[in-house]
Structure formats: structure tokens, C-alpha cells
Image: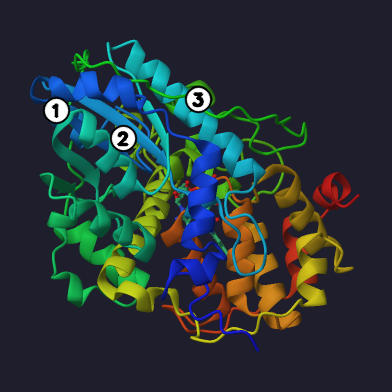
Amino acid sequence: MVNYSGLRKFFTLECLYHLSEPNAREADLRLRNKEPSLSQSVILTKHKSVRMAHIIWLRNDLRIIDHDIFHHLQDQPIIPLYIFDPREHASDAWGHSRLGKHRRRFLMEGLQALREELQSRGSDLCIRHGYPAEVIEQMHQHYTIEGIHVYGHDAYEERQQEEAVKKLGIPFHLYEADTLYHPADLPFPIEKMPFVFTDFRKKMEKQSEVRPFPPTPKQFVKPEIDLDWGDIPKVDYKIDSRSAFPFRGGTRAALDRLEHYFWETDQLAQYKNTRNGLLGTDYSSKFSPWLAQGAISARFIYHQVKKYESLRTKNQSTYWLIFELIWRDFFRFTAKSEGNRFFRIPREVKAMRIPAFELWKSGQTGEPFIDANMKELAATGFMSNRGRQNVGSYLVHQLNVPWYAGAAWFESQLIDYDVYSNWGNWTYVAGVGHDPRSRVFNISRQQSMYDPEGAYVEVWGK
Ligand SMILES: Cc1cc2nc3c(=O)[nH]c(=O)nc-3n(C[C@H](O)[C@H](O)[C@H](O)COP(=O)(O)OP(=O)(O)OC[C@H]3O[C@@H](n4cnc5c(N)ncnc54)[C@H](O)[C@@H]3O)c2cc1C
């Protein structure tokens, strides 16, 4: 038995992701930063005192609309910075690349869209590769960084990144989580976070309000420094024509989707009836990938729903979209409240190849409904909520594969991968999370309810 102590979030990241520091450094070298050469840096350092800028360190907040930091720093010289941390695209304990090809493609598109948005407002997006603390320290050797500004996270790795950067001694500004309800508006101390979703939702709905969001800055200040802004890696990717999510990353695409789903087709007014669908783009909002990369905020969507309710119609469906966004907050605030306990992963994991797991991943279990869903995921990086619940239940309860193996596969594949929603939902499905009721699905019953004509299995089962 190999000790993979802490498959996901515990102990050393090197052990988790098979990436020792020297290997990571090699990866860094391959990905080479483009700081000025030594001779250039001598010249730059002479003027360091006048080369001042704030770094906006971007992670899952790739947007400028409803972005507290961009709003706050709109009159200051800024370097919006995205860092490819080699740990994030290392392999997990099962050998999957954590940033699989679908996620990678969607991320690059999101970065490109943000860069263009920033350029149109007089700024740019700086791209670097390496450990965030090292990257920022290196930049600080050349330019005086007045402050580092970042949205805080509540997951282990992200907090480790923050701690390392804090140690640089540069003024460090952590902004409150990027959630629907502002963390400061929770009507209870975080240690008293309700254990069950319904209690949480009721408290929030009764005792809290979603805040308005700040106006979007029209222009930014680019620092007067000779900075190589870096390239966004290119990816070769073709979208599967059957995909329920044939969209691109970035805010523009997210806004177009909202326009279509709310205002052009009024699908929002049907959402509660269609949300368990499996085929096509419009059975659900498909906001999750953009929410996961932060190209759009939950708060922005909320206020659009409110606008829709006042201008078009208000019904159970319009409410239900907000209800689902509250689920997203629930997992996020639970992680904040529980710390590493949130992940529920045993300390020792048997690192063995499990044939049933391999068959599940490639959609070859012999159960048509499960196989169709797994093939869709592998081909597109997306799967419906109904599908996720079924394949999760099947993996855990029929195939007896540890649930965290499934969660790791989802992490690698899902373009909407979100650390809180993924691990929170998996613990839920496995019955080890916040609603420990058994969630064993009868797969053939589910198939006959949600794919009665077999249309879904027909499309994806081949
Ligand atoms: C095993 C499993 C793993 C999952 N992993 C993720 C994940 O990594 N990232 C992710 O965003 N969602 C995850 N979900 C939740 C849900 O399946 C997706 O959010 C949803 O399918 C996304 O499609 P949509 O945007 O069209 O959702 P809609 O039905 O249109 O819902 C609107 C929004 O509400 C939120 N939401 C809806 N359902 C949930 C839920 N159960 N938990 C949390 N938020 C929810 C999402 O932000 C979603 O975009 C997972 C669910 C399961 C069962």
C-alpha cells in the first residue's frame, strides 16, 4: 500500500500530485517566465522606485464586471496577473492530469477574452508560469509592487499559495470570497454554519440580502514600466458537435449566453421544468463553467434574474435558478467553516488500478445510461446535473469504487470544475457529506424517467 496521505487537500502537495519541488522547477523552466534579462534588469532596477504598480492576482475571477478589486484600483497603476502554477496541471494520485484538455481549452479562452477586455480599457493581462510567491518576488525585484490584491479562497492549496505570497512582505490585500451572498452578510458566525442546505438557505433568504455590485471601470491605468506581458499558451481543440456546452470561455460568451437564455428565448421562465434534461444547450442555464472561471459572477446573474422578474415574469423557475446558486454558496461557506474536514478524504488511500474505475471513466461499464454520460464527459468536459448524480451513485454504490476517485476524475475533466461544488457534491452523492441520507439511484428507473425515448443514449452511447 502506498501512502497517498491526503489524496486531494491534505499534507504535502508534492506527495499528492507526484510533483517534487525539483520537478516542478523543471516544469517551470519549460514554461519559462519572461522577466527582463540580467542586463535589462540592471537598467530597470535603477529606476525601481518610480516603477510602482499594484498587482491584481487573478485566479478564478477572470472578469472585470462585478470585480471588487478592479473597481477599487481603477485609478491606480495595475498589473493584472495570472499565474500558471505547475501544481495545478500536475498529475493526481490516479495519474490524471488535473487540468485536462477541456478545462485547459476553456481557461485559455477565458484568459484571452480577459486580456482583450483589459486592452480595450488601456491595460493588459500579464501571464507568468511558476509558483506564485516566486513569480511575484521575481517581479518585485524589477518593479516596486505597492500591493498584492487577491480574492481569498477557502481550500487548502489556494490558501497555501496565499500564505507563501504573504511572506514576501509586500502589502497583501485579501478580498472576501466571490459568492452570491457576501461573507460579511452571513447572519451567523461561520463556526455556526448550518449543517444542512435547507437550514442555510432559509436563514440566508430571511436574514440576508444579495448586495448590489460596483460599476464596471471604463479605463485602467497601465504602469509605465517595460514589462513583457507574456503569451497565453495555444491549444488545439475541436468542440464536439453533440456538446451541450458548445461555448467559449470568457465574459463576452457568458453574457451572450445570459442574453440568449433570459432575454431572447425566455428559457429562464421554464427552468424548473427543464433543468433535469440531458440533451441540447437549453435545458439548464449552463452558467457553471463561466462561474467556475469567474468570467461572470453569481451576484451579476442574481441581479439579472431580478430584472427579468420585474420586466418579464416572476415564477417558480426564476426563483429556482437563485435557489441553485445558493447551493453553490452552501458548499463554499461550508468549506470556509470546516477547513480541510470539508474534503472528507481518508488519510490513507490504496493506490491501485481499479478495473471498474477505468471502465467507468471510459464509459464501458455495460450500463447504457451511465456509459452515455461518461462518454459525454470525456468528449466534451460537461455533463448534466442529472447525469452527474447517476454516474456518482453508480460508481460508489454499484461499483464500490471510492468516491474520491470519481471526484478526482471530475476535477480533471469538468470545464466547470469548482473545488467546493465538486468535492461537496461528491461527498453528498456518496452519503458522507452534509446530508448523510442514502442516495442510491435506481439507474434503470432514472433512465426511464429522464431518457424515456432513449434519445440521450442514442446520441452518446456509441
Ligand atoms: C458529483 C457532482 C459533481 C459536481 N461538480 C460540480 C463542479 O465541479 N462545479 C459546478 O459548478 N457544479 C458541480 N456540480 C453541480 C451541478 O451539477 C452543476 O453546477 C450544474 O450541472 C451546472 O450546469 P448549469 O450551469 O446548467 O446548472 P443550472 O441548473 O442552470 O444551475 C445554475 C447554477 O447553480 C449552481 N448549481 C446548480 N446545482 C448545483 C449544485 N448541486 N451544487 C452547487 N452548485 C449548483 C451552478 O453554479 C449552476 O451554474 C456537481 C454535481 C454533482 C452531482
Query: Quarter of the image containing the N terminus?
Result: bottom right
Q: Nearer the viewer, mark 2 or mark 1?
A: 1
Q: Dot 2 surroundings within 10 Å: few (below 14), some, or many (20 or more)?
A: some
Label 2–label 3 contact, CB within 8 A = no
228, above or below 333, in the image:
above
Q: Is residue 42 left or right of residue 127?
A: left
- Residue drawn where x is 18% and y is 70% of the image: 190
Label 3–label 1 contact, CB within 8 A = no
Q: Is residue 400 left or right of residue 459?
A: left
Q: Which residue is mark 3?
A: 253
431, above or below 298, in the image:
below
Q: Nearer the viewer, mark 3 or mark 1?
A: 1
Asked whether mark 2 and ligand 1 are closer than 8 Å, the reply comes as: no
x, y percentage for residue 245?
63, 37
Number of the label disc, if any, that sits on residue 300: 2
> Which circle's residue, 2 or 1, is located before the other in the chain?
1
Which amino acid type is marked by label 2? Phe
x, y percentage for residue 246?
65, 31
**What kind of element bears circle 1?**
loop
- Residue drawn where x is 86% and y is 62% of the image: 368
Report the Cα–Cα distance between label 3 and label 1: 25 Å
x, y percentage for residue 276?
62, 53
* Quarter of the rendering containing residue 433: bottom left
